[in-house]
Amino acid sequence: MAKFIATAFLSFSVLFSTIALADPYVDKTGVLMNKQQLNQWRSPESAAPYFALNGRLFYMTIDDFASIIDNTYAQCDDLDAYTNRKGVTKACKDHVFSGIKEIIALSKDKTVSDQAWKIGTRYAWDSHNPVPGMNVWDFNGWAAGIRVAKSKGY
């Protein structure tokens, strides 16, 4: 198990440091992720191991998750020009990072049931590309979904 954890940390470090050349927010996220308990687990659905964040199972590889984070931040690019307002791109990336921090906090929260976690995950998907690494996520929507599910007793 220790080998799996070390592999997970190494994967996040390499993936996020490679992507981070273009985006400091991705680098910040990589630093934050590397402070978490990351494990790999085997699923019969995949040849590659999936990962768990602070004990919460993800049904995707670490590489796919790193790509989702990169894709999500990339959606914020050029918003200053698009809206003709300075600071919108930064505000968007701050919002994404805030959502990622909240998801990490909720992943550690023992009062969040596995069912509430799964329900919240449904709120995360902004796109449904069958290739997981091509998707983007609404991390704030995911956190909101978890809070709603938890408030309803899940």
Image: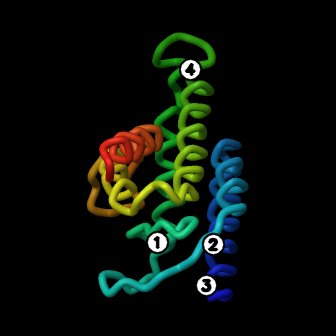
In x, y percent, where is residue 102? Answer: 56, 44
Residue type of the residue flagged with mark 2: Ser
- Looking at the rendered structure, the kind of residue marked 1 is Thr
> Going from the N terminus, do you reach mark 2 or mark 4 first?
2
Circle nearer the N terminus (4, 1): 1
**Which residue is tagged 2?**
11
Query: According to the image, label 3 marks what residue?
Result: 4
Q: Earlier in the sequence, mark 3 or mark 1?
A: 3
Q: Tags 3 and 1 in contact by the CB under 8 Å rule? A: no
Q: Name the residue under label 1.
A: 61
Residue at x 52%, y 11% (from the top left corner) = 84
- Residue 86 position, x and y percent, is 61, 14
Q: Earlier in the sequence, mark 2 or mark 3?
A: 3
Specify whether 7 is left or right of 134.
right
Task: Looking at the picture, tell me which residue is in the foreground, 120 or 93.
Answer: 120
Q: Which of 109 and 36 lies nearest the eye of the viewer? A: 109
Type of residue at label 3? Phe
Gap between marks 2 and 3 measured at Cα: 10 Å
Residues at circles 2 and 1 in contact by the CB criterion of under 8 Å: no
Nearest the camera: 153 or 118? 153
Mark 2: few/some/many CA within 10 Å (<14, 14-19, 20+): some
Q: Name the residue under label 4.
A: 88
Whole-percent x, y for residue 9 in the image: 67, 72
Mark 2–mark 1 Cα distance, whole angstroms, equals 10 Å
